[in-house]
Amino acid sequence: MPSFSFDTLTTLWHLANLPDEALGFIALPGQEPVFPSTFAIGTAAQSTIAAAALAACELAHVRGADRQRISVDMTHAAVECTGWFTVDDKEPETWGAFSGLYQCADGYVRIHANFEHHQNGALQVLGLDPNTATRADAERALLGWRAIDFEDACAERGLVVTMLRTFAQWDATPQAQAIAKQPLMTITRIGDAPPRTLAPLSVDARPLDGVRVLDFTRILAGPVGGRALAAFGADVMLVNSPNLPNIPAIADTSRGKRSAHLDLLTDAGRDTLWRLIDEAHVFSQGYRPGGLAELGFGPLAVAARRPGIVYTSLTAYGTQGPWATRRGFDSLVQTATGFNDAEGNGKPRPLPMQMLDMASGFLMAFGAAAALWKQQHEGGSWHVEVSLAQTGHWLRGLGRVDGGLDAARPDFAPYLQRKASGFGDLNAVRPAARLERTPAGYARPSVPPGTSEATW
């Protein structure tokens, strides 16, 4: 009898209109709950990872490879979605000193302050000096604000703050209503091009060998998507700006990738990027809505230069509705859309991992592989769009897990892999997707930004 995870995967598969025959090659062992949560995070992790792996293998089938059996264990998938890792046996500090949930005059707000400019901006809205303010100062100041007023004031300045909502409160917003009308993800043809034939695969080649991916993403979801493509064999080049900070998770999420610097504010940087695009098959980006388009690298411009490209875009709140241009991260979207309230049942509680980020990342990988499959069959240039809030809407639709909060956190040890990296001795979760013939893994160690040359 098919499992709920298999039914969930089938729905994802049909969203991309991929061949049903491939579904006979997937196994999805395990059952909920696998972590303490009332939400079906095990199902979400397992089905999105399986979709990405299966789509990569189906693309390989187009290139002459036999289909191969794939297994994704639910517990392993959920552990992979924690993003847990150590460098030299030390867990990195995940959150900034001012990040977190704060009480206001009538509720709560969550501030994301992992980057200094976001932290300082929020403190300045509170009338505090970023050079001298303490967290206690911020806590006192926020007691004088209504939550919605502080959210609005920060949004007007492009900061990343949101008020805590219940599901009912979120559902009443125009943004929630806009998201509810949209599919989980979209794969849209944006230009004409002949099929860009990918080289046939040898018997032992990984599914995405020969596929070149430009990874213009920084914070978790996008980098996870690029890492998944690398695990299935793609040649992924992570491109960072030398002017922007990164988060510690880059040591984990850049496994399998080249890691180059490009300054797109310079003529030389833009010229180099165009040369890279000329030989790329996928362009993945997760910057603020319109950010890369303003520099000349939006989906239509890239498709005009490189007909047949697959362009993937990640946003926080989707492409429609009043929040379409609003910045956001997983923790904020969980708070804004009602998950923190629902999970805590009166006392705000986050999900046990940044599940919206992780599922969105694997959906980006799934969408990229599915769009490449379409490109091989019918030509065209394609745009894949994913958003954290739409992923959240989908996760909520998977239903609740009775007694989920009573589940024990699983032992991570069976799923870890220790390897040298450019950051130090890296101990991190190996890929949960197990491919029978060509195992998933990372051909390159993670390295700091700028280590690699910006050339294929």
Image (cartoon, rainbow, N blue to C red):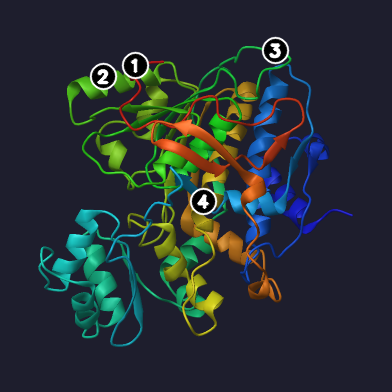
Mark 2: secondary structure: helix
Q: Which residue is mark 1?
A: 275
Q: Nearer the viewer, mark 4 or mark 1?
A: 4
Residue 140 in the image: x percent, y percent?
21, 83
Residue at image location 54% in from the left, 30% down from the top: 230
Q: Quadrant of residue 158?
A: bottom left
Residue 242 falls left or right of residue 280: left
Mark 4: secondary structure: loop
Numbered badge on residue 450: none
Q: Which residue is mark 3?
A: 202
Relative height, residue 418 to residue 163 (above, below): above
Q: Which residue is mark 2?
A: 271
Q: Which residue is mark 4?
A: 84
How packed mark 1 is, by other alpha carbons closer than 10 Å (few <14, some 14-19, many 20 or more), is: few
- Which residue occupies the foreground of this view, 85 or 219? 85
Say what amino acid the circle numbered 3 marks: Ser
Say what amino acid the circle numbered 1 marks: Arg
Q: CA distance from mark 4 to mark 3?
A: 34 Å
Residue 1 in the image: x percent, y percent?
89, 55
Say what amino acid the circle numbered 2 marks: Asp
How packed mark 3 is, by other alpha carbons closer than 10 Å (few <14, some 14-19, many 20 or more), is: few
